[in-house]
Amino acid sequence: MARGSRYPQEVRERAVRMVFEHQDEHASQWAAITSIAVKFGVSSETLRKWVRRAEVDGGRRPGLTTEEREHLKALERENRELRRANEILKSAAAFFGAELDRRPTRCPGGTRSTSANALPGDPRRAFLWPGCGQGYSARFERVRPQADTPTVLASTRES
């Protein structure tokens, strides 16, 4: 957010223009700045900064122009926001990734599921948690549905 200026833009432009017009009449640019600063009621340092900024913007002195400086600030602000968002996304991905990697060590509710007694071909067996079976490992895969039949989960036994 830009803060308000103590001096109007017209006063700044007029003071800077007078420095450029009358600097040949003085021994140095600083002497012209101090002389004109008193007439406008501003400090010499303030007028000197206005003159330097006008020289850069006019191409008389190397440096970033006002427009380039504003563009650079906007890019830095956007970069900061993107880095912050990236950190949030990384931590969220790590959190949710860790949640997906965790496997329950016990059956839900601490007891065996009622479908634990189901036979290996029984579709109810597909709803068991890992480790809740009766001592053999079962791999569950999705059977492709036919045109009119609903999706069925089937169990295949690994050898």
Image (spheres, grey):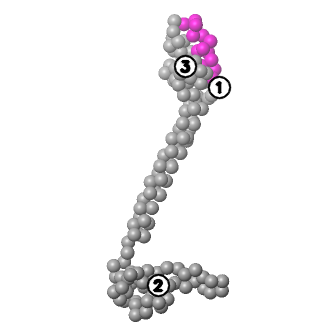
Of 56 and 45, the residue lying toward us: 56
- Name the quadrant of the N terminus: top right
Q: Does residue 31 belong to the magenta stretch?
A: no
The residue under the point 40% across, 90% down is 116
Q: Which of marks 3 and 2 is nearer the N terminus?
A: 3
Q: Please determine whether, in this image, residue 70 is positioned above or below residue 83.
A: above
Of 155 and 88, the residue lying toward us: 155
Question: x, y (%) of residue 82?
Answer: 51, 49
Point out which mark residue 22 bears: none
- Name the quadrant of the C terminus: bottom left
- Given the image, on which type of amino acid does mark 1 rest? Glu
Point out which mark residue 155 bears: 2
The residue under the point 43% across, 93% down is 118
Q: Please determine whether, in this image, residue 98 is positioned above or below residue 16.
A: below
Q: Quadrant of residue 102?
A: bottom left
Question: x, y (%) of residue 145?
Answer: 60, 82
The reply to whether residue 3 is in sight is no
- Given the image, on which type of amino acid does mark 3 rest? Arg
- Mark 1 secondary-structure assignment: helix
Point out which mark residue 61 bears: 3
Question: x, y (%) of residue 47?
Answer: 54, 21
Residue density around tag 3, few if under 14, some if 14–19, many if 20 or more, within 10 Å: few
Instruction: Find the magenta span and give its range.
Output: 13-26
Q: Are marks 1 and 2 in contact (CB under 8 Å)?
A: no
Point out which mark residue 10 bears: 1
Q: Does residue 23 belong to the magenta stretch?
A: yes
Q: Please determine whether, in this image, residue 67 is positioned above or below residue 97.
A: above
Relative placement, left or right, of 156 versus 10 is: left
Q: Earlier in the sequence, mark 3 or mark 1?
A: 1
- Given the image, on which type of amino acid does mark 2 rest? Ser
- The prevailing secondary structure element of the residues shown in magenta is helix
